[in-house]
Amino acid sequence: MDAALAAEALGGTLPPLLVAAERVAATVAQGVHGRRRTGRGDSFWQYRPFAEGDAAQRVDWRQSARSDRLFVRETEWEAAQTVYLWVADGAGMRWHSAGAPPKRDRAVLLTMALASLLLRAGEHVRLLGSAPHPASGRPALPAIATLLGQQAGPERGPHGQGRPPEQALPPRLPMARHAHVVLMGDFLEPLSDIREAMAYFAAIPVTGHILQVIDPAEAELPFRGRIRFEGPGRTPKGVAGGGILVPRVEDIRAAYHERLADQIAGIAAIAAASGWRASLHRTDHPPGAALLSLYEALANR
Amino acid sequence: MIFAQPWLLVAFAALPVIWWLVRASPPAPRTQLFPALRLLADLRATVESPERTPPWLLILRLVAASCLILGLADPILDPGHGLPGTGPLLIVLDDGWAAAADWPDRTAAAAAAIAAAGRAERPVALLTTAPSADGRAPAIEGPMPPAAAEARLAALTPLPWPPDHAAAARALGSWHEPGTAVLFIDNGLRDPAGDTAFRAALRGAGTLTDARAAGTAALLQTPVSVNGHLILRLAAAPQRIARSYDVLAQGSDGRTLNRVTITLPAKAGAAQAPLGLPTVLANGVTRLQLAGSPTAGGTVLLDDQWRRRIVGLASAAGDAADAPLTGPLYYLNRALGPDMEIRHRPLDQLLAQPLSVLILSDRPLAPGPERDAVARFVQRGGLLIRFGGPLTAETPDPLLPVHLLQQDRSLGGALSWNKPEHLALFPATSPFAGLAVPKDVTVSRQLLADPASLAAASVWATLTDGTPLVSAAPLGQGRIVLFHVTADADWSSLPLSGLFPEMLDRLVRLASGIADVGGDARLAPAEIMNGYGDLGAPNAAAQPIRVDDLPLAAPSPKTPPGLYGPAGGRRAFNLGAVLPPPEAAPTIPGAARQDLAGTRAERPLGPWLVAAALLLLAVDLLASLALRGALKGSGPRLARAGRAMVLLGLGLSMARAAHAAAPVQAPMQAPVQAAVQAAVPPCALATCLAYVLTGDSTVDRLSHDGLASLSDFVTSRSAAILAPPVGVSPGRDDLSLYPLLYWPIIPGDGLPSATAIAALNRFMENGGIILIDTEGGDSGGQGSGAGM
């Protein structure tokens, strides 16, 4: 009963999410000009004259019969690969500062838009660590949206049952080799933990993209005066239970910026070490730009 | 500025401690959720930042603490001058009539001196120079503690008679306290009797300070009557600048009938101005009073002797009655003179208006309404004077003092041997007593009275042979007087003589009913003025006064100014009639001068400082809350804080009122007024049209726009000014404010609720118009108001 109600509530929110995702995707799709090259695929690309070394079975006899020369039918390159998508969850991801959407909402939006783009291009899209679902074609998108919503879970209160599951780093699950993985999250965990998680993916091996979604308040630390900082979810290791009392936030802002830059640079280094890419997205920036760069990065691989 | 509790200033020594305490305890931090907590975790040790209160908050708190300490130390701004000497303080206070105008200044000066004595812990003695209301001569009260003197001072009021400086000098003579500081609060006027001794006694009593007012006391003297018009007179001590005074002429019901401005030129001691009222209104004036600060000296009560009589004339001769030299009314007009207001009209018109005296010249009264009206006039106190003549002799009527014989008597005619008779001396009981009888007045013809009827009447004038010339008889409250001759020169030469106007004048004054009080009669006090010129019941010391003494009596507790005599014949006794014109008193040599008008009341600053401290602490509270983030962005919290501030403001104003050093400041009540105004619907103040809210925003906007255009049209094309229209829900809003209700019915609307129908019915019963618009729908259908 509860689940049904939750699903119903979710169903109410899904179409707007889908619409928003489609809208973001559409802006990017019109700007895509890549992938116009030969490769493995089903759709026709071009005929070219037969050259030495081409296999005989590649000759398109119907076309060749119209003239004296032999033609080889080339198909368009088709990324018939699976793209795994993953969105971090947790109280930290649900948090947002004034005027910005929650990081998780932005990440889900980007995920959906990316999925929409990929599905249009014929890719297989799977959610990492979720129930099986249709992976290709238009029906996949609503299924992905539903799963992302379920993953979010109903929010019943800050301390109740509906407390979101803390999943700051991607799970170690078996996946197809040479697949693409897109990981979205705030990645504020210690760099060693991130490196350890990434080492699993590098060993499979898969390549992919890390999109670090952070809030503008996290990027800039705009607070002033005497503030006690508390974690939104569980208190991270090394921090006393009552949070951190900062006498004057202005005094530590520079040091914080430095440390945040170190974190971002560290993530980029980890990604580069295993052939991945990493980018940063702030929730107060428009999602289209992030999606475009993400899609370009995937398409030009 | 001085401090009433200077030892409290020691608390300033604690300020550094407060500084240290406040500085060491920073405000509670506000809490902020932050996911990137880990990045902040060990920044804590690396950054050097002292946990301290912001400097402005520190200063705010220190200022608040200073205000509190200063306020509790009770500083006083503009304290009175220090008292000379070391002994008691003797306050000599002139509390005669001249002190009433600036009495608050005087008591303020005395109170300031008493407060200064209280601070120096010196006893206070009080001497008021006017005899007290119960007749006791001035005597020194005290020495007593300053608090008792303050209470005694508060009980003093100005008295309506002049001060008795001679008696005060005797009282001062018995004062032998070394080191006395004497404060003489002076009325600034010279007292002809005993002033020299008084001033000497003042100097002898101790170190003298003379607190003197600018000498504004003005004496309103009794008016004079010139040609029947009242001239107001005013006297004051001459000054170097011109002053102007307003005199209010008030009726018996307290209404002000006129306001006359009298300008007193520079260096002049007296001025006058006409009252400037028509007679009917002038007769209603019972009291003249200086506007502004009323005093007994600035008040003149007017009794009946100031009233002009209105004389009505009527005769049977018609238009010829006032023909020069031949008409009877011609002589009466001349004889009555300009002091009277004379009306010459038909009898019924005369009696329809207020009248003192009615003179009928050979005018028989027809039986019936006319005679009854005249009889009523006399019975209500009117004076009827009738002159004889042929018609009166033929048709005698009952409204005559004597019974007339049918035949008149002719003297010195061609067929008679006797000569015209002269007038006899007037009897002592007659109102004409004392008038000289000229030798040349003769009577050649007269009406004869039945000798039997003379017993009931009084004869006021006779001829030398003893036959009555003027007879009179009372009727009701009034009186009928009959001249047995005509009012013209046909029957006698009396109208031609100088005696005739005098006789008429005596008679007309008789109409007021005051002339026949003997000079020895004693008039009991009826209503007595207080120092401010207000009338009240006489006190025990007031005594009856002889009529002859009235113009000369000295005002005192025994004979205070006011109204004397029985209810019908009140006589006024005014200060302005008996007191000499005010003269400025010379300064006392050797006395320190103090200007009474210039003294500023002591202003205690303590309450204000405490209030400021509380206000600062309230600001500090808000600032601390803001620093803690408790006020951030949450509307209800802000509203709660706002309400708290309003309550705090109200509390402050109440605390201020309770402290009662000064009146509550009006701005404190402003929030309350604003709240009250917010509760008033806008249409209570301006007419506006209304429409019923349907809940459909399109229809509602249409209604609003339509009615707004209609309102604009009405406003531009007619005298009505309509405010913008208002949407209402019947049953919830008060419909009584709107003249017209536009009710669009949209299809599908159900019947209005029972309360709405009741409200609409009430609206219709009280004359409201409802314009029901079914928008082309079925007018008989449901929801079209058919249920009403």
Image (cartoon, coloured by chain):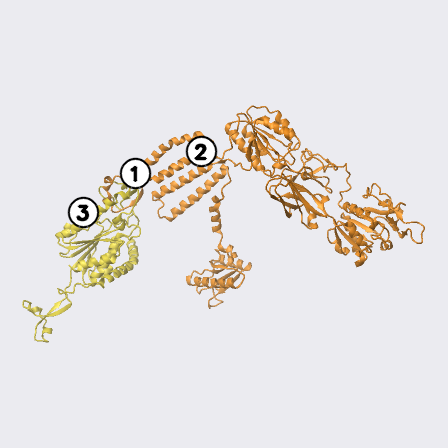
**Where is the C terminus of chain A found, in terms of image quarters?**
bottom left
| Residue at 77 percent of width and 42 percent of height | B515
Asked if the residue at tag 3 contacts the one at tag 2, i.e. Cβ–Cβ closer than 8 Å, the answer is no
Q: Secondary structure at mark 1?
A: loop
| Residue at 53 percent of width and 33 percent of height | B112
Mark 2 — residue? Answer: B72
Q: Which mark is residue B14?
A: none
Q: Secondary structure at mark 2?
A: helix
Q: CA distance from mark 1 to mark 3?
A: 32 Å
Mark 3 — residue? Answer: A191
Same chain for the residues at labels 2 and 1, yes or no? yes
Mark 1 — residue? Answer: B51
User: Would you say residue B773 is visible in this rendering?
Assistant: yes
Same chain for the residues at labels 2 and 3, yes or no? no
- The chain coloured orange is B
> What amino acid type is highlighted by mark number 2?
Leu
User: Would you say residue B475 is visible in this rendering?
Assistant: no
Q: Is residue B500 left or right of residue B537?
A: right
Q: Position of residue B427 (x, y in %)?
A: 84, 42
Q: Position of residue B605 (x, y in %)?
A: 47, 36
- Chain A colour is yellow
Q: Position of residue A81 (x, y in %)?
A: 15, 60
Of marks 1 and 3, the one in the foreground = 1
